[in-house]
Amino acid sequence: MVLPRRALISITSAKAKLFNGKETTGLFISEALHPYQVLTAAGFDVDLASETGSYTPDWLSQQPDFLNGETLSTWSDLDSEFRKKLDNMPKAADLDGSKYGIFYASAGHAALIDYPTASALQKIASQVWTNGGIVASVCHGPAIFANVVDLSTNEHIIKGKKITGFTTEAEHTMGIAEELKSWNSELVEELAARLGATYERAPGIWDDFHVVDGRLVTGQNPASAASTAKAAVAAFEKL
């Protein structure tokens, strides 16, 4: 089967307060924008979609440490292709998963809230995987793997696989671990352990780090978004 040179970047629809209610978390912008740039440069048609068709930008992701230079210019330009697609996203339920060769789960802390039950996004990811395509995630994106299965076996796709994602150590370093517990959501390391995946990480919590295990490609944190996308493209070229 020849897979479409088309990718879907999933976006969290959730938003929540963090840092004792002072800041709003949602989509971590660069975790969608950097993969978008990598994938389009590699000749992919790229769509964006969330479970509800909506999104909220994460506060931290708009700070200069994370949003600067070309990335900031693209985000600030409401007429850029990225912004037009992001601001006019379809609901995932309105898309045909068979049209995609790559599924890439961007994130932000808010993904811990909606991704575990985002059935329409999970259906697309499951279709891409079952059709022999690449499934990728970055940072808190693995939350979507709670119900992404190989449709031919009904097994979770990360079972027995190596993955990475945002570290529990980083949640504590940011001082928000206790707040996250109030969401009753699994952290990435907890999800990996429950579903039988092997969690790997870089020595530093902010290091650019990704893991490739066959058709599954995962990145640890915002700094890993571009390298994870490049690895996903490389894995696609080997299919």
Image (cartoon, rainbow, N blue to C red):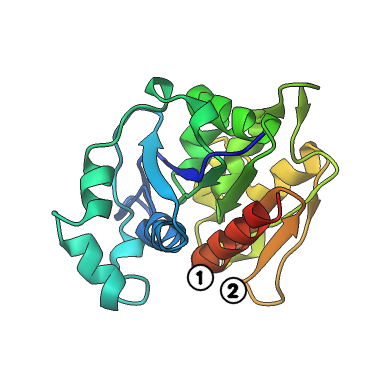
Q: Is residue 40 above or below residue 55?
A: below
Label 1 or label 2, whichever comes before in sequence order: 2
Residue 165 seen: no
Residue 19's disc is: none
Q: Residue at x 59, y 73 (%)?
A: 208
Q: Residue at x 58, y 50 (%)?
A: 137
Looking at the picture, how far across and down is residue 62, in whole percent?
29, 64
Position of the N terminus, as image quadrant, is top right
The quadrant holding residue 154 is top right
Looking at the picture, how far across and down is residue 132, in whole percent?
69, 37
Q: Is residue 77 above or below residue 126?
A: below
Looking at the picture, how far across and down is residue 58, in whole percent?
33, 54
Q: Is residue 105 left or right of residue 55?
A: right
Q: Could you tell me the amino acid type at mark 2?
A: Asp
Q: Which of the pair 154/176 is nearer the observer?
A: 154
Pointer 1 with pointer 2, Cβ within 8 A: yes
The quadrant holding residue 63 is bottom left
- Judged from the image, the secondary structure of the residue bearing numbered disc 1 is helix
Q: Is residue 51 left or right of residue 22?
A: right
Q: Could you tell me the amino acid type at mark 1?
A: Ala
Residue bearing the label numbered 1: 223
Residue bearing the label numbered 2: 208
Residue that lies at the very extreme toward the front in this rendered image: 2
